[in-house]
Image (tube, rainbow, N blue to C red):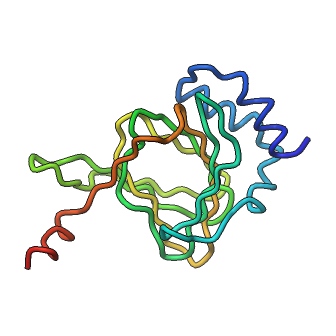
Amino acid sequence: MSLLQAIEQTFCKLQDPSLEELQAALQDIEGTLGEVPAYATEPQQFAYGRSVIYSATNLEVIVIHIPAFEATAIHNHGPAIGAACLIRGSLLNTKYRLDNEGYPISHAEDRIQAGEYFTAPKDQIHQLSNPGQEAAISLHVYSPPLRQVERYLPYSEILDYVI
């Protein structure tokens, strides 16, 4: 069975999945994850490549490609929850909380290696960065689909505009 067939067969059964159900579904298709790099796209409008490979009314599956030494913006996932598996490379998942002024302050970091799973609970603010020389490629599933993502500028970047 191909990756896309496994995704369709596994994820079409999920109606209102929990974080644990999303991660379990990803683990169920583990045998096809070697095909994920074929769906990675080069960065275009962002510092990373993003390719939606499956979409339904209640969830979407995305391949993320973060080149060496690049990062996503600091962001949340709106009302969505997510689970992911790192297929190739390494990632640093930096988690943030908002200070009293609404600026993101780093409060935790997780190092993720190829083959590891990680989650994005509701209301999490984070940034994925690639600290290595090899491209990082990961497969993500979000429910509901990402529609209300909010990006945050760190306070240091706001100061750059003022000074």
Picture quadrant where residue 14 is located: top right
Picture quadrant where residue 90 is located: bottom right
**Identity of the residue furthest to the right in this view:** 1
Q: Quadrant of the C terminus?
A: bottom left
Q: Nearer the viewer, residue 15 or 93?
A: 15
32 left or right, relative to 151: right
Q: Residue at x 54, y 44 (%)?
A: 118
Q: Residue at x 45, y 67 (%)?
A: 71
Picture coordinates of residue 157 (x, y %)? 21, 70
Picture coordinates of residue 33 (x, y %)? 77, 50
77 left or right, relative to 13: left
Q: Nearer the viewer, residue 101 or 91?
A: 101
Q: Is residue 133 above or below residue 55?
A: below
70 left or right, relative to 28: left
Picture coordinates of residue 102 (x, y %)? 16, 49
Q: Is residue 42 above or below residue 28?
A: below
Q: Nearer the viewer, residue 138 or 157?
A: 157
Q: Is residue 13 above or below residue 136?
A: above
Picture coordinates of residue 78 (x, y %)? 39, 39
Q: Residue at x 91, y 41 (%)?
A: 1
Q: Residue at x 60, y 29 (%)?
A: 57
Number of on-image labels? 0
